[in-house]
Image: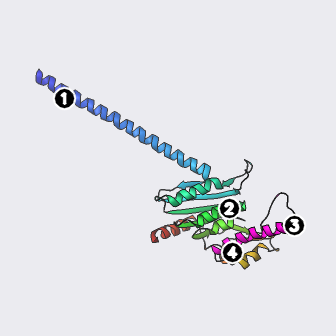
């Protein structure tokens, strides 16, 4: 009887241990599922709010879309890129040892000059490999953003509009106003020429072109024309951009 009781006790004890182990495993599994769900939600939130995501292969993806917002908030109906979101992300990217490169996707109409240049300067100063891809378009202040990376691509149907500096609102018709416009334009031209193969003289010619835009000065460059003018390195798509970025990361 004692032996039978001892055997039954051992069996019961073993079953109890198995049950506890299964419960613990179930809790751990549920916990892992919750963590994975939270991580996925965090990624989705980053895409919604910042147009940015950290990819599995240690490449950070950043999008510049719509209008680049300045110090004033644009209407809620306007798609915008906010510099107060982008600048901290770029700083984090530079300092994060887990990030090895940046892929910049552009489809922007331009926007605030100061904010656009701030983002462009930030990207240009990143020590890690960076590649940009112009999709629908990268107009106005989007041009410095497109050339701010180490290497740039544009899709065959992508466009870039180069035009003089514009200002909305009240403008005082005096020489200091013109000088201010000229200074701002020189900053943009100098940045573009420094980070591309286009010369300052040629950029000013494209800006002052009167034969393309019916109601404005400027030039529209489509696909390979941007490459021929020396603004963009190559015509290509997303696979080309990833391939180039991986090559640059491996060489570093």
Asked whether residue 171 is drawn in magenta, I would say: yes
Q: Could you give the CA–CA distance between mark 3 and mark 2, rounded to whole angstroms?
A: 26 Å
Residue highlighted by disc 3: 174
Q: Is the residue under label 1 in contact with that under label 2 (CB below 8 Å)?
A: no
Asked whether residue 105 is drawn in magenta, I would say: no
Q: Which mark is residue 116?
A: 2
* Image quadrant where residue 159 sits: bottom right
Report whether 27 appears left or right of 248.
left
Mark 3: which secondary structure?
A: loop
Q: Is the residue under label 2 in contact with that under label 3 (CB below 8 Å)?
A: no
Q: Could you give the CA–CA distance between mark 4 and mark 3, rounded to whole angstroms?
A: 37 Å
Give the extent of the magenta segment.
Answer: 168-196
Mark 1: which secondary structure?
A: helix
Category of crowding for the residue at label 3, using alpha-carbon neighbours closer than 10 angstroms: few (below 14), some (14–19), many (at least 20): few
Q: Which mark is residue 225?
A: 4
Q: Is the residue under label 3 in contact with that under label 1 (CB below 8 Å)?
A: no
Report whether 220 appears left or right of 131.
right
Q: Position of residue 115 (x, y in %)?
A: 68, 59
Q: Residue at x 68, y 61 (%)?
A: 116
Q: Is the residue under label 1 in contact with that under label 4 (CB below 8 Å)?
A: no
Q: Residue at x 66, y 73 (%)?
A: 231
Q: Position of residue 172 (x, y in %)?
A: 87, 62
Comes first in the chain, label 4 or label 3: 3
Q: Position of residue 191 (x, y in %)?
A: 66, 71
The colour scheme used here is: rainbow
Category of crowding for the residue at label 4, using alpha-carbon neighbours closer than 10 angstroms: few (below 14), some (14–19), many (at least 20): some
Q: Which mark is residue 10?
A: 1
């Amino acid at each position: 009887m004692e032996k039978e009781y001892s055997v039954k006790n051992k069996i019961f004890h073993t079953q109890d241990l198995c049950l506890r182990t299964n419960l613990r495993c179930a809790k751990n599994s549920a916990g892992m599922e919750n963590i994975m769900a939270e991580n996925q939600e965090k990624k989705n939130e980053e895409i919604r709010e910042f147009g940015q995501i950290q990819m599995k292969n240690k490449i950070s993806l950043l999008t510049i879309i719509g209008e680049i917002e300045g110090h004033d908030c644009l209407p809620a109906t306007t798609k915008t890129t906010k510099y107060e979101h982008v600048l901290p992300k770029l700083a984090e990217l530079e300092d994060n040892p887990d990030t090895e490169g940046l892929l910049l996707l552009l489809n922007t109409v331009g926007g605030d000059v100061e904010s656009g240049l701030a983002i462009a300067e930030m990207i240009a100063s990143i020590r890690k490999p960076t590649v940009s891809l112009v999709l629908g378009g990268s107009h106005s202040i989007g041009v410095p953003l497109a050339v701010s990376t180490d290497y740039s691509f544009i899709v065959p149907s992508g466009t870039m509009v180069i035009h003089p500096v514009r200002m909305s609102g009240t403008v005082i018709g005096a020489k200091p106003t013109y000088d201010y416009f000229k200074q701002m334009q020189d900053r943009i031209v100098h940045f573009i020429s420094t980070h591309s193969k286009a010369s300052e003289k040629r950029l000013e010619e494209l800006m002052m072109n009167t034969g393309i835009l019916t109601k404005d000065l400027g030039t529209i460059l489509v696909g390979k024309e941007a490459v021929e003018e020396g603004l963009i390195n190559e015509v290509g798509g997303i696979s080309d951009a990833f391939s180039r970025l991986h090559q640059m990361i491996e060489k570093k």
